Each structure stands twice: as C-alpha cells, then as structure tokens.
Amino acid sequence: MKKKSEDSAPQELSFEGALEELETLVGTLEDGKVPLETSLLLVQRGLGLIERCEGELARAEFVLEQLMATPDGELQTQRIGGDDEDDDDEF
C-alpha cells in the first residue's frame, strides 16, 4: 500500500517529507528486488524529489545569504557555499 506522501506531487511535500521518501526509494532500488519497469518509475519519482529538495535548499541558501552579519553587527550580503572563484585554494 502506498503512503500518502507517495501520492503527492513532489512540490507539495515538505523538504523533510521529500527527503524521507527519496531515502526510501533509494533503499528499494538498492535492494534490486523490483522489476525494471517499477525501477524506472521509482527513478522518475526520485528525480522529482531531488528537484524539490534542491529547490528548497536553494531558497534556504538565498535567505541565509541575505541574513549574514559582520562582526560589528552590520548586515551584509555574503555568498555561502564556496562557489566563489577566489576560494579555489581551499582544496
């Protein structure tokens, strides 16, 4: 029997709900006990869940970017996540 979240479009799920369902799908696929056609449907569903999670993470990153404060208490926009070209020497 399907869970309620599996009947919902990925965009309707919370981040946590989408991530939980994605983890379940990955486990099912890793078991290798489902037919190919079912596996393809699970992969398709998983891609939608990944897109949902990535979108929510991008929104959260944007909010954090807007809320960064300097040590003296002034607010400034600061990019997080190490995507700056100047940060190449960190690795």
Image (cartoon, rainbow, N blue to C red):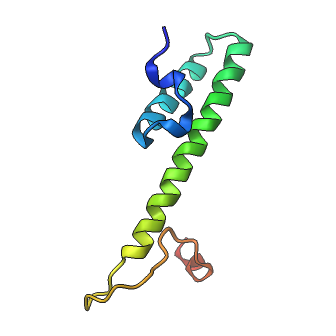
Q: Residue furthest left?
A: 72
Q: Nearer the viewer, residue 37 or 3?
A: 3
41 to the left or right of 18 = right
Q: Position of residue 5 (x, y in %)?
A: 46, 25
75 sits left or right of 10 in the view: left
| Rendered image quadrant of residue 49 | top right
Horizontal and vertical percent for residue 31?
57, 17
Foreground residue among 38 and 29? 38
In this view, 59 is above or below 90 = above
User: Residue 1, relative to residue 56: is it above or below?
Assistant: above
Image quadrant holding the C terminus, namely bottom right
Q: Quadrant of residue 45?
A: top right
Q: Residue shown at 58%/22% (left/top)?
A: 30
Q: Relative to 14, does residue 78 appear above or below in the rendering?
A: below
- Please give the name of the residue rendered at 48% of the width and 67% of the height, measured from the top-left corner: 62
In front: 83, or 73?
Answer: 73
Residue 11 at what x, y percent from top left?
A: 54, 40
Q: Name the residue nearer the viewer: 86 or 90.
A: 86
